[in-house]
Amino acid sequence: MAAKIAFFPVGNGDMTLLQLESGRKVLVDINIRAAADDPEDKTADVAKMLRERLTRDAKGRLYVDAFLLSHPDKDHCTGLRTHFHLGPPAEWSKAADKIFIREMWSSPMVFRRASKKNRVLCDDAQAFNTEARRRVQRFRDSQGAVEEGDRILILGEDENGKTDDLGQILVKIDEVFSKVNGAHDDSLSVRLLAALPKSDDEGEEDVLSKNASSTILRFALAAEGNPDAGRYLSGGDAEVAIWERLWDRHKKRPDWLSYDILLSPHHCSWHSLSYDSWSEMREKAKVSEKARSALAQTRDGAVIVASSNPIKDDDNDPPCIRAKREYVAITDAAKGVFKCVGELPSEDDPDVLEFEIGRNGPRVKTRLMKAASVLGPGVVGRQPLAHG
């Protein structure tokens, strides 16, 4: 089966489906808005788009092999309770026909670093947290003998030794893993880069911000005999301070941050590249060179994708026109392209932006292929680099 990465048109939100060459599917974030149910509303029906890309198991359940919530903002988890089965596997209902989550990927820091100002999480984020806790407790009670629907992978250690007994399902920062739904998968290699623990120079608000908790993963997807055919860097809503820390941590091994496709953090927000306010300072706002370096580790022909509303030359942030200009400069240097999901193939009718991973990198799939001008140069591939 061909490896693919699909970005759904969810406005200023994230929803990405990775299909591995093995056939397993990993979903990162969702933003399934109720407005899509109104036939008079133009909101894209991404629930339908997702279901069309999933398959059913022997029990008739549509499923994803793994689901990651990068952090608990509403635009990353809306629709979870409505469209996904939560609770014991035996309680899945054929009548409700919700999507079955074989394995959850969850970072304890996502909920540990919830903002004091916004401590009350939305209902879907609370539901995710409750389900994650249920699965962890099921793992403990069964001494690790869990089946799909009860599985969870913990991404990063919790504070005060709270995850010390979860070694079998725990991935530590900087480690690489290749397991999906409890089984090794040769077609995938994932490096966990964040959420990072508190640094000595972080203020209380920095430590507790939900954006600072974003899980950052660098995926390497196999295709056509190449185990490192396509690299995908996913960073949730991580802002400038986190990318600066990642550069300080990895500048002597920048290959750990390299990518063929980058999902621009926080929906193409200027605050992933700068501490300055774009609306207040406009062209006087300064780029953090450290953060930019972390986000500029391109491979040849790299693509940067903005999962956002259409990007205009205005004061909005996100998406921010100034951030777009930086990303365009980065992709131009790599002979690649920048694309906004909310603009393709048109602003009035956005569709899934899907890439198929070939031996030499990503190439666009879907109806965007019908308009060559949409793509531009540099997307069909490159000579693969050594895996890092």
Image (cartoon, rainbow, N blue to C red):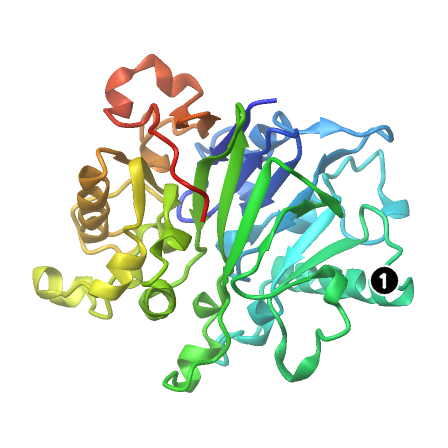
Q: Residue furthest front?
A: 386
Quadrant assignment, res 365: top left
- Image coordinates of residue 25 in percent, x first then y, are 63, 36
Indicate the secondary structure of the residue bearing disc 1.
helix
Q: Position of residue 201 (x, y in %)?
A: 36, 85
| Percent coordinates x, y for residue 332 in the rendering | 18, 38
Quarter where residue 309 is shown: top left
Image spot of residue 152 (x, y percent): 73, 56
Q: Tell which of 270 and 383 is nearer to you.
A: 383
Q: Check disc 1: other Cα within 10 Å, few if <14, some if 14-19, many if 20+.
A: some
Please tell me which residue lies in front, 381 or 354.
Answer: 381
Against 288, is 333 above or below?
Answer: above
Q: Label 1 amino acid?
A: Arg
Residue in view at x 37 percent, y 48 percent: 258
Q: Which residue is mark 1?
A: 138
Q: What residue is at 50 percent from the left and 81 percent from the top?
A: 116
Image position of 79 with respect to 20: above or below:
below
Q: Which residue sits at x=85%, y=34%?
A: 94
Closest to the observer, 385 or 311: 385
Task: Work out whether residue 163 or residue 56 is closer to the camera in this orientation and state it.
Answer: 163
Residue 16's place in the image compared with 270, above or below, is: above
Q: On the rendered structure, is 172 left or right of 16?
A: right
Residue at horizontal 86%, vertical 53%? Answer: 146
Q: Is residue 24 left or right of residue 292?
A: right
Picture quarter containing residue 279? bottom left
The residue furthest top is 370
Q: Is residue 227 visible?
A: yes
